[in-house]
């Protein structure tokens, strides 16, 4: 996937989640992580802010290299900081509304 395609999906997913949180009066903060390994950066951030939980979307279409190298969500789920992780499986109904592609 191209970098612009990835950015478009991230923006779409972020907007979808943001709208859901706003609609339910849930306070939130969006933080942009940077680095070569976003899974490691996410765990480090969660540890730094003493997060009580992380929420991730699972990979919809696992590729062979994900099995060999380990999918990013697996790195977060098995994080060394031992921060609990809630996993959300992709839902076909959300794709119809433009959320979580």
Image: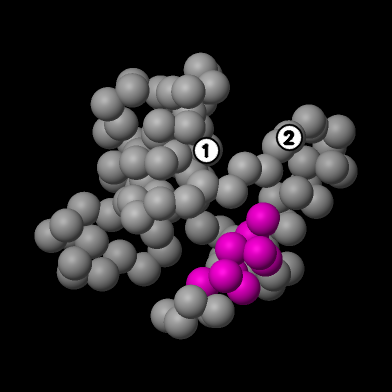
Which residues are drawn in magenta?
A: 6-14
Residue marked by disc 2: 28
Give the label on residue 55, or none.
1
Note whether residue 93 is visible.
no
Secondary structure found at label 2:
loop
Taking the magenta stretch, the answer to whether it contains residue 1 is no
Circle 2 Cα neighbour tier, 10 Å, few/some/many (<14 / 14–19 / ≥20): few
Is residue 62 visible from the viewing direction of this image?
A: yes
Q: Residue 50: x and y, percent? A: 51, 17
Query: Residue 20: horizontal and vertical position, in percent?
Result: 77, 47
- Residue depicted at 46% across the width and 82% down the height: 2
Relative placement, left or right, of 10 versus 62 is: right
Precedes in sequence: disc 2 or disc 1: 2
Badge 1 local density, few (<14 within 10 Å), some, or many (20+)? few
Residue drawn at the location 40% of the way across and 59% of the way down? 59
Location of residue 21 (image quadrant): top right
Vertical relation: 44 (above or below) 40: above
Which residue is most to the left?
68
Q: How is the image coloured?
A: one colour
What secondary structure is marked by label 1? strand
Q: Residue at x 30, y 65 (%)?
A: 62
- The residue nearer to you, when weighing 94 against 9, is 9
- Could you tell me residue 53's position as x and y percent? 51, 25
Question: Quick one: quadrant of the N terminus?
Answer: bottom left
Name the chief secondary structure element in magenta: helix
């Amino acid at each position: 996937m191209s970098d612009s395609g990835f950015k478009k999906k991230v923006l779409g997913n972020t907007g979808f989640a943001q709208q859901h949180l706003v609609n339910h009066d849930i306070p939130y903060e969006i933080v942009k992580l940077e680095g070569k390994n976003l899974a490691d950066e996410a765990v480090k951030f969660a540890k730094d802010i003493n997060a009580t939980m992380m929420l991730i979307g699972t990979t919809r279409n696992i590729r062979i290299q994900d099995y060999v190298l380990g999918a990013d969500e697996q790195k977060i789920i098995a994080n060394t900081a031992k921060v609990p992780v809630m996993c959300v499986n992709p839902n076909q109904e959300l794709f119809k509304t433009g959320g979580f592609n």
